[in-house]
Amino acid sequence: MTAEDKQETGSVREPSMLRQKEMTQGHYERLAQAKESGQKVVYTFVPGNLTELLLAFDVLPVLPEINALQSGMRKRSAKYIAEAERQGHSEDVCTYVKCDIGMLLEGNVGPTGEPLPEPDLLLLSYTGCFTFLKWFELLRERYNCPVAMLHVPYQSQGEIEPGMVEYVVEQIQTEVIPKLEEITGRKYDEDRVRELLGLSAQAEDDLVAVLESAKNKPSPIDSYFGGVYYIGPLFTAFRGTQDAVEYYAQLRRETEERIARGLGPITPVGTMQEERFRLVVEGPPNWTHFHQFWSMFHEQGAVVVASTYTKVGGLYERGFRHDPSRPLQTLAEYCLGCYTNLSLPARVDMISDYVRDYEADGFLINSVKSCNSFSAGQLVMLREVEERCGQPGAFIETDLVDPRYFSASNVKNRIESYFQMLEQRRSVQTGTKQATPSEKVAPS
Amino acid sequence: MSPDSHDPANGGAPLNPCGGCSGPEALAAPARGMQSSGHAPLDDILSRCEGLYFDYDHEAVAEWKRKHPTGAAVGYLPVYVPREVFHAAGVLPVGVLGAGEQLEIVRGDACFQSYICHLPRSVVELGASGRLDVLDGMVFPSTCDVIRNLSGIWQIMFPEKLTRYLDVPQTTDPRVGQQFFRQVISDLFRDLCKLTGRKPEECDISGSIRLYAENRRVIEELNALRKTSPWTVPGSEAYLVLRAAMVLPVEDHTQLVRDYLQAAQDAGRKPQDHARVSLCGVFCEQPPLGMLRTIERSGCAIVDDDSMQLLRWLPTDLEGGEDPIDALAQAWCLDISESASRFVPDGTCKGAGFVKTVQESGADGVVFAAPSFCDPALLDRPMLVDACEAAGINSTSFQYAENSGQMQPIREQTGTFADSIKLWSDE
Ligand code: SF4
Ligand code: SF4
């Protein structure tokens, strides 16, 4: 493992991981110094974000969802959620929002230990989720700053319909750009945006190559647990940067090297040795017990070969690329095309295609309590995909960042039962065992 | 033919079509002091409205369709759809607001996890049990993620029926939103006309706009009376009368409201010393009728609420003009009423509009009642509570589901709230 950095914990770190860490650290350092450096700060969301436009204005993006998930991973979310609930928020609502509000109430301290700067603008591009509207109404109350609203229509008929792109473009021109010009004192520079979009497309090509590498057997990557790291730079503050181009080129090289060497994915305890099950996963991960959750898969030799969560920030493998020749149109198409902006039947199609194209043994839905956008309708999706693919699916329930909704033993039992069932089906299919009634892993 | 040219639908359904009873609270008699006067017209009107409320099988809609063989009926979910274009296309718009407290949910529960609100499961139950077969299509407005995703479930469940998602604009620039919404409404209108075989260019949308504006005028009268004289128009009665708009053709509903107003004023009910409250959070999943009556029975007069928001949006003097679809789109985009399903643009303090509404209603306090697991209502609530506190308006909060049966805790909570309001006002 010449290119790998074996850490004392036993985990394996490839150079791309270290590069990503440095990039992220650098970003948080710039944020911590934003006040002194005079750089403006814009809070915005992951799906359908306009990073290239923001970077063209030289503003620093902050993504509250990322703050929330990091708080979850750093075991701080329980405290933040409790604080938000003490302030009158219901137990029933999205925990990302409560985690972010709680973090704000507790000083808005970021991962570097320094407070995050307050926003100069809230860019509300609420692709695929209505809760974003409420989230920024709540933040506006606290920060007393302007909101730039970008309404992205829903692909209810499974495609972008006439007039939608123009509508989004018009809003970018009449709402988003003027507000960015106002807070930065700069003029919109379309050439600069084109330049950044060109860099985005390069990085997107490489991300697609990495995600599609999972079609190999064994898969060199885990497209869910590993995937959430791979999408990080492109879905957040780095799309359109040279850093992202280099990161994805490096990640692609490492992945190709793993394919050449017949290696499985890297897990927190080293390279996975035997690929026993190939899965497709729908829904976001749980962040409070992320590694424990992952271990329930890799310990069983299960690798996720495709996931929908890694498409919330763009459906690149379906052909979309940011196109520098049509800057605002391409940004609009990007917003419209994110996964959670697809109709339920289109999501069913996509999962069914994944099961077939990635030769998966099964699929699993991780339904998170927080997220109506993802979760409402997933039981119908389960049945539809089962019917289309002729394969039983598994259904588990957790949450994003509220540890009260992660029952490790319950989740583990369900996942193990599911793997046993897949094993039995395999035996039956290869004729080595008698068929047994299939066990459905049902929601609690 | 338009949905107007027929006899008033008679409600038709038995009072309790399910044959069972959800419990003593749900169908209890009207609250103390609000008993019927024995005045026949009022009793008749209310019993007709209650019949429509419990008409899960949509008999009234079926009856309308029998009388209008070339017409169609299309359902819609809360909160906003432009019913005017339904009407102009010869389509009866039918509000599908869930199934309240009496329908047993089996298939609906198989579609939604326990942490999703109740409304979509009862809507699925109604559909899967054939109770919506009378509808020729469904429209799902962009109220929240649940209704949005429900539109996809509907496409899967009923591939042969018209299913449309209505993207209601949230832009802060009315001009941009209006242009987009005009297209959305035009597309919907075209699809509705296909159902009835009408030519869009031959439809009188302006005529329909005028009918709905008239309907809003009588509703405004009803709401005004409710505020000045809540014992004459108790909130739970007003709710039933307004709810009838979900299934009645607009002309019939306008007449119904007029009849009710007359009958209620003739009834000579005595003034009551109830605490006046505004009910907030009930704009989508509907509160059980038993809950409204429980709140009243605990000593509160519900002088205003945000149920049936659809009936209030848009001006009462709206005209179609040369481009009636554009007029509808513009009216929506210029409407500044606050709602949990609409973004409050910069420059307007969230909750300011709500506080103004509460003050105008003369309410002494606010009862925040949100459906469990409803992100829009529940995330709005802390902001509205803050706005109320800043304005010196007291409030109390709880959650419900459309099928909540246990009313005792609500009765205690609102009873205590009513007492405390009276205490403050005495001081
Ligand atoms: S509801 Fe889902 S998509 Fe929306 S903010 Fe919460 S976690 Fe994100
Ligand atoms: S009750 Fe709330 S969450 Fe449920 S469908 Fe209605 S608005 Fe959406």
Image (tube, grey):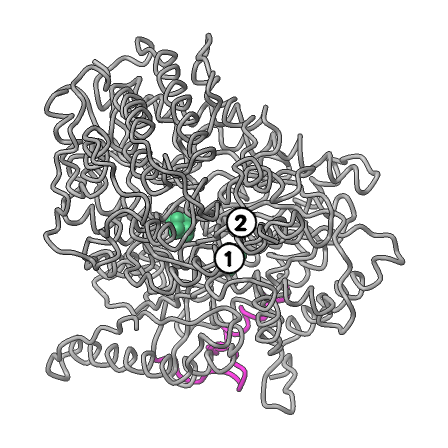
Give the letter of the chain under mark 1. Answer: B
Q: Amino acid at mark 2?
A: Gly
Badge 2: residue crowd in 10 Å (few <14, some 14–19, many ≥20): many
Q: Position of residue A270 (x, y in %)?
A: 53, 85
Image: A349 above or below B6: below
SS category of the residue bearing label 2 = strand
According to the picture, the residue beneath numbered tag 1 turns out to be B396
**Quadrant in the rendering for residue A409:** bottom left
In this rendering, does residue A378 appear at all?
yes
Q: Position of residue B362 (x, y in %)?
A: 54, 39
Q: Nearest the camera: B73 or A208?
A: B73
Is residue B229 rendered magenta in the image?
A: no
Residue found 67% across the figure and 68% down from its top? A20
Residue found 51% across the figure and 33% down from its top? B169
| Side (left or right) of B85 relative to A404 | left
The Cα atoms of the two marked residues, 1 and 2, are separated by 8 Å
Is residue A266 rendered magenta in the image?
A: yes
Q: Position of residue B191 (x, y in %)?
A: 30, 25
Q: Position of residue A444 (x, y in %)?
A: 30, 73
Residue range of the region highlighted in magenta in the rendering: A249-276
Image: A215 above or below B298: below
According to the picture, the residue beneath numbered tag 2 turns out to be B365
| Side (left or right) of A4 relative to B157 | right
SS category of the residue bearing label 1 = strand
Residue found 65% across the figure and 83% down from its top? A5
Image: A226 above or below B378: below
